[in-house]
Image (cartoon, coloured by chain):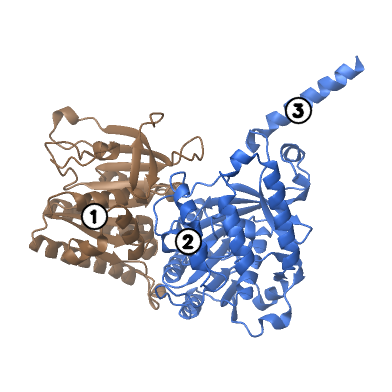
Chain colours: A brown, B blue
Amino acid sequence: MDRMASNLLDGAIGFDDPTNPSPLIGRLLLVEDCVETSGAFVLHHLLKRAFSSPNSSNAVIFLAFSQSFVHYDRILRKLGCNLAAQRDNGRFVFFDMLTLGCSGEKTRSGKETDEGVLVGLYCKIQRAVDALIQENKKHVTIVIDDISLLEVAANGSSNLVLDFLHYCHTLLSEVGCSIIALDHEDVYMDIKRPLSLQLEYLADVLIKVGPLATGIAKDVHGQLTVLNKPVEGLQDKLRNRVQNFQFYIKENGTEFFYSGSRA
Amino acid sequence: MAATKPRTGSFSRNFSSAHSSKTPGYKHGPNGTTFISSGIPDLDKILCGGFPLGSLVLVMEDAEAPHHMLLLRNFMSQGLVHNQPLLYASPSRDPRGFLGTLPSPGASKDDKSRDNSSEQEKGLRIAWQYKKYFGDDQESTNAIDSKYEFCNDFDLRRPFDRHFFSGKHVECVSILDSSSLSNFRDRCATFLSQVPRNDGNISSAGRIAIQSLCAPQCDHSNMEWEMLSFLRYLKSMVRSSNAVAVVTFPPSLLSPSFSKRWQHMADTLLSVRAIPDEDKELAKLLTGYQDMVGLLNVHKVAQINTQVPKILEATTFSIKLQKRRYLVLECLNQAPIDVSSGSSYGSTGSCSGSSKTASLEF
């Protein structure tokens, strides 16, 4: 049906499967990137994808910890998608979280407040989801950009962040949302990394973004590894599907190609 | 990058004409960004224009050398020249004393002749058919520079006159004693409230320079999450105002994962490194090794309002002092192997050397 210029990334996530037009329903997609290569373009790509599909029952709740609305709006506009208009339509709910958890007096008072911050945030999300469902938006996507900053907002308590994510995860099964989250892989290098491991365990689709092993190149911006865990009950898809390819980011979209196959 | 290049080329003329109505010290960049100068002409060129307003610049220090101070000083001096409000914070007892070490703008006439002559030389050396591939961009930026003095050359040996910043808006903060960063954060907030972002016209741009934020002598140096939270707050505040914050930090004092978190926070990420005095192998590999005082690495270039990363021609530059006064950055001229495999190169060099002497003996 909506066979709009499918590319390797969409294929790997499963968008081009005719039997299941929205493969992300009830699933968590995790993007992991590193300092050298930002994975934000995957979020932009999926955001555009959510809004450009013909069925208008898609809606997005965006938790922006790292950038302002103007930034996303400009990028998405160049991709051919007007976020401001979508916001007015009620299909795009933007939470500006840039200053969440750093509001003046807090800092010293400790745990309860940090917890309060995330609990409050979850309540807001839940209300937003309920409102969207009321408006007959069947497929709600929650985008989190990014989780490491969510940790900073929670003052480093990874337990609180995990609780928050688990709560959000329950929304997946309850109302059939999907979650798209960005996280940085390299910030969990040295310590025992419960958060990143838990996240990877929770994730149904894991996309790792990294630089080329051979260093910087002008016409290849990096490489992607997509791990698509099988949907339960499908015997023929028991094995994880892992795909590797490279990408080149442009203002109006991203090119995906297998290594060495770029024309 | 390659795809966007012709486009920026065709628009560059418009930029310069639109620029003429603007106040000096600001330059319009792509995607609705506005640049201010880093105070080092070469660094502006490397970063494709300078530091975009609303960005957080992190500089990773060399723990044993003060090269980050060179960047900070020029950044601050440039702000003073353009009459921009400045907030300087450092872990020293008397941060205002640092202002006495700021370099003053050099004699501009002299610089221009230097620039022009080098430009002409380059022109002569380049075969004419290759000329169209570059030069165009450089010329236009040069034209803007010389006309509006977007960026000055600073004479590192001549300090700013004391009376010069008496009338200017300069705030100095010591972050040594502040037991928590909340006081300092409020200070930054009030400073940034003077330069709010209103669409279109830029009346003034603020500069925040913070030296060694996580220095061990500060009380807050062991509160890693609080520092991150401060950085995050600073970034979001800077985003919503016409300002650039340059923060230097010694990454070796942070745990590796926190160092990475800091690096993720940066819009523009640079690192400086001293080069050892007597590194014979490096001296063999690089031309002009004697004049170098250090190396500058560009890890990240700010991507504001765009998703396309800037791929630079080179990411490592040598820091040199021209005539012992002016800070210049140059690409490394090196043999087509990297420094890490330099030992093998050095050994083969000595091998051939020994064989030569052997042949002489015979």
The kind of residue on which mark 3 rests is Gly
- Residue B349 location in percent, x, y? 76, 28
Badge 2 and badge 1 both on one subunit: no
**Label 2: element kind:** helix
Does B51 sit left or right of B275 as displayed? Answer: left
x then y, percent, for residue A171: 17, 55
Whether marks 3 and 2 lie on the same chain? yes
Q: Which residue is mark 3?
A: B349
Instruction: Give the image location of residue B222, x and y in percent.
Output: 52, 64
**Label 1 to label 3: alpha-carbon separation:** 61 Å
Q: Is residue A28 left or right of residue A213?
A: left
Q: Which residue is mark 2?
A: B14
- Density class for disc 2 (Cα within 10 Å; few <14, some 14-19, many ≥20) is few
Q: Which mark is residue B142?
A: none
The mark closer to the camera, 3 or 2, is 2
Q: Is residue B188 left or right of residue A106?
A: right
Nearer the observer, B28 or A165: B28
Q: Chain of mark 3?
A: B
- At label 3, counting other C-alpha atoms closer than 10 Å, the crowd grade (few under 14, some 14-19, many 20 or more) is some
User: Marks 2/1: CA distance?
Assistant: 52 Å
Q: Are marks 1 and 3 on the same chain?
A: no
Residue B64 appears in the rendering: yes
Q: Would you name the residue on which mark 1 appears?
A: A166
